[in-house]
Structure formats: C-alpha cells, structure tokens
Image (tube, rainbow, N blue to C red):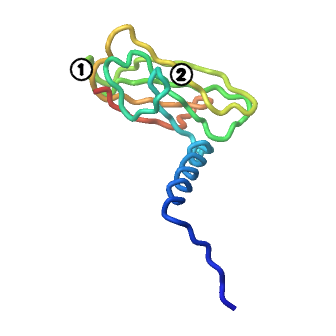
Amino acid sequence: MKSKTASTSGRELPLISLFLLTFMSAQGCGSNEPSITLQTAGGDEVSALTPTDQEFHVIVNIGSPAGESNVRMELIAVETEAGNNQSVLTEDYDVGGINNQVDFTVTLPRPWPVGSYRVDAYVDDSLTTSRTFMIE
C-alpha cells in the first residue's frame, strides 16, 4: 500500500512559518521559565537602549506562579560613564494568584549614561533571573 504524503506549495510555507512564530511568541517560548524583557516606552521589545530612552519597561516573568510572592527588580549600572557597579533603582511588587508577570517602569529625567547595565529579578528574596544590556 502506498502511503500518502502531504505537499505544500512554496507560497504556503511563509504563512505556516508566520503562524508558528506568532503562536510561539504568544506562548512566550517557554513562558514557564523566568525571564526579563526590555521594552521602550512605545512597547517595542529591544535588546539595547539609547541614552534618550528616558523611560523604558523591564518586564519580569517569574515563571510558574507560586501563589502570593514578592518580586523585586534591581537595576545596576555595571560599567558606565557615571560609575561602576552602582545600584540605580530597586522596586518591589507583590503578585498573587495566577499573575506571573510584572512590568516595572524605569525613568530618568535626563539622558542615561552610556554603558552596560544589569537587571536582577528576585522572587521572595531569591535571585531568579538576570539580564545584562547596553545603553549606547
């Protein structure tokens, strides 16, 4: 007996790829894993910022919700023109129920010093995830 195989035309593949990318993005590509995402004030996801991005968002996904928890985000200037290994901002937020994501808004009334920064995220005082990024 001859087996049947599905065939797709070349123009269908981009639609399938786009659907898979959209589905994976909506699912967070492993959203049960702790992660940190940077977004501009306009909501664009970025890997680096500019000095004039005076407001940006640090989105902390703590992974699987563990009921009532405290999430702390610490922004550290690792190596910048203004100094090294300086704590810039620490913010706390209580989460509960099924909430596993916190949006921290970070602002500076003047341009950010150029250099490398790190965001540390703690859940109930335990370091959960970190992310290093540049302001250039």
**Callout 2 environment at 10 Å: few (<14), some (14 to 19), or many (20+)?**
some
User: According to the image, label 1 marks what residue?
Assistant: 81
In the image, is residue 38 above or below residue 11? above
Q: Position of residue 129 (x, y in %)?
A: 51, 37
Q: Indicate the amino acid at tag 1.
A: Glu
Residue occupying image coordinates x 50% and y 35%: 36
Q: Quadrant of the N terminus?
A: bottom right
Q: Nearer the viewer, residue 46 or 132?
A: 46
Q: Position of residue 98 (x, y in %)?
A: 73, 33
Residue occupying image coordinates x 48% and y 63%: 10
Horizontal relation, residue 133 to residue 89: left or right:
left
Q: Position of residue 73 (x, y in %)?
A: 52, 25
User: According to the image, label 2 marks what residue?
Assistant: 104
**Callout 1 environment at 10 Å: few (<14), some (14 to 19), or many (20+)?**
few
Total of numbered circles in the picture? 2
Q: Secondary structure at mark 2?
A: strand
Q: Indicate the amino acid at tag 2.
A: Phe
Q: Nearer the viewer, residue 29 or 104?
A: 29
The residue mark sitting in front, 2 or 1, is 2
Residue occupying image coordinates x 57% and y 71%: 7
Horizontal relation, residue 54 to residue 63: left or right:
left
Query: Which quarter of the figure has residue 119?
Result: top left
